[in-house]
Image (tube, grey):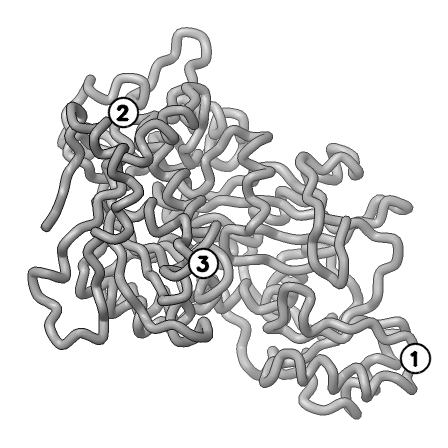
Amino acid sequence: MSTHRDEKGLDSKLDEKNDQQSSNVKFDLGAPQLNDDYDQSVDNEADDQFEFSALSKPSSTSSMDSMTNITNTHGSVVNTKMPFNNDTHSGNKSALRRYARQMSGVSFGSTSSFRQQPFAATPKALSEILGGHRIINKILIANNGIAAVKCMRSIRRWSYEMFRQENAIKFVAMVTPEDMKANAEYIRYADHYVNVQGGPSHMNYSNCELIVDIAKRFPVEAVWAGWGHASENPKLPELLHHNGIAFIGPPEQAMWALGDKIASTIIAQSADVPTLTWSGSHIKLKTNVGESQNVNVPMELYEQACFADYQKGLESAIKIGFPVMIKASEGGGGKGIRKCTKSEEFENLFRQVQTEVPGSPIFLMKYADSCRHLEVQIIADESGQAISLFGRDCSIQRRHQKIIEEAPAVIAPREILEQMEKAAVRLAKMVGYISAGTVEYLYNPADQTFFFLELNPRLQVEHPCTEMITDVNLPACQLQV
């Protein structure tokens, strides 16, 4: 039985919110029948109205500079291109940001926007004017916890600010028995939820085949994976695209190219982005850096930068010079990384990295002392345009895991930060990147030099720091591009 919002009955619904969990309709993928009952909904809208109304600010910006998204009065999202010429895209970042704020409801002087007056044009007219080509009514959240909550709250806030209806887009959530038992907060934010198998992540939120199956059978028009779980698995966008479902994130080609530490470093040095001395310093791609294209690193070049056994790794470490960092290409969150200061301890540390991230290629990089860890937030659209949204400082870490994030980054001079931002945008365009991403650098304050570290092809946990200093709603940007 589906239930819908009734403004007159809102107070009575709020009085009954404690009973919603027990009355929610559940969808079990293990059930033999998945027919009309599968499309029953869970009405959690009443609980959210006051919260999202309080969160909304007229000045909040949630639009992408090179592409904007218009939600029509029937509850659909239209992906639209920005009416700027190529010169404006390439040279005038302030004009791009001004346009983003325009379309998000912030006026400059006498300038007004469609977002301030969405009723000024019909959905068909808006789509025709702005070149819309995709409509999204329902999104599957392939994540749980704070990631799922943040996505739903951000997109509903954007929807409310733009069209005064926070539930224009519906959300489908995946729920394990563990999440249900814990009464996880994200469940009540969802319009529908689907029961999935509990246990390790590969059995639910990281299971690409399961995610695609739910997306097809529910159905939804797009999938949002957030961070962690399957967010950096190129197999997920690949399977979704083959089934005609949008992935709110980078395409599989860009994820393959920049999501891997070895491949991304090869591409970075090929794009003339500074890199530390490492085991693949001698490798460079022959490509036209200035144009948007799908750049791939051939396997024979890739294998030249990594090691399968410690003997060859030790030889490379001696050439690079100790101390070195032994790193697993597929590592993350502080795993798969060790500092080696002398050859006698190399074998033991190499095997530790192998054990922490089984099957991952391993490479070496020169250890940089007294450096700061800075990162640049980027967002790019499918038209080949990309911009940076300033930087963050995540130098305060414990066991290679970030503890405190600062924004904006103030340790480096403005001209150095601009160089970092330009390099990040150049990388994104080089591989045809789409959606939000973060380019990480090491910065040496002593000589004001910086070096490429890696690119995270996803929205990071710390993205609210950028939202606070730019007034840009990043999950909403991901949806729009």
Residue at 59%, 58% in the rendered image: 455
**Cα distance, mark 1 to mark 2?**
62 Å
Q: Circle 2 sits in a helix, a strand or a loop, which is it?
A: loop
Q: Position of residue 9 (x, y in %)?
A: 16, 28
Q: Nearer the viewer, mark 1 or mark 3?
A: 1
**133 left or right, relative to 92:** left
Q: Amino acid at mark 1?
A: Lys
Q: Residues within 10 Å of mark 2 (few under 14, many from 20)?
A: some
Position of 92 relative to 310 (above/below): above
For the residue carrying disc 1, how many other residues have a C-alpha within 10 Å: few (<14), some (14-19), or many (20+)? some
- Whether residue 480 sits left or right of residue 432 in the image: it is left
The answer to which of 31 and 395 lies nearer the viewer is 31
Q: Is residue 134 in view from this perspective?
A: no
Q: Which mark is residue 293?
A: 3
Q: Quadrant of residue 358?
A: bottom right
Residue behind mark 1: 342
Q: Is residue 25 visible?
A: yes
Question: Which residue is denoted by mark 2 in the rendering?
Answer: 164
Among numbered discs 2 and 3, the one appearing first in the sequence: 2
For badge 3, the amino acid type reads: Gln
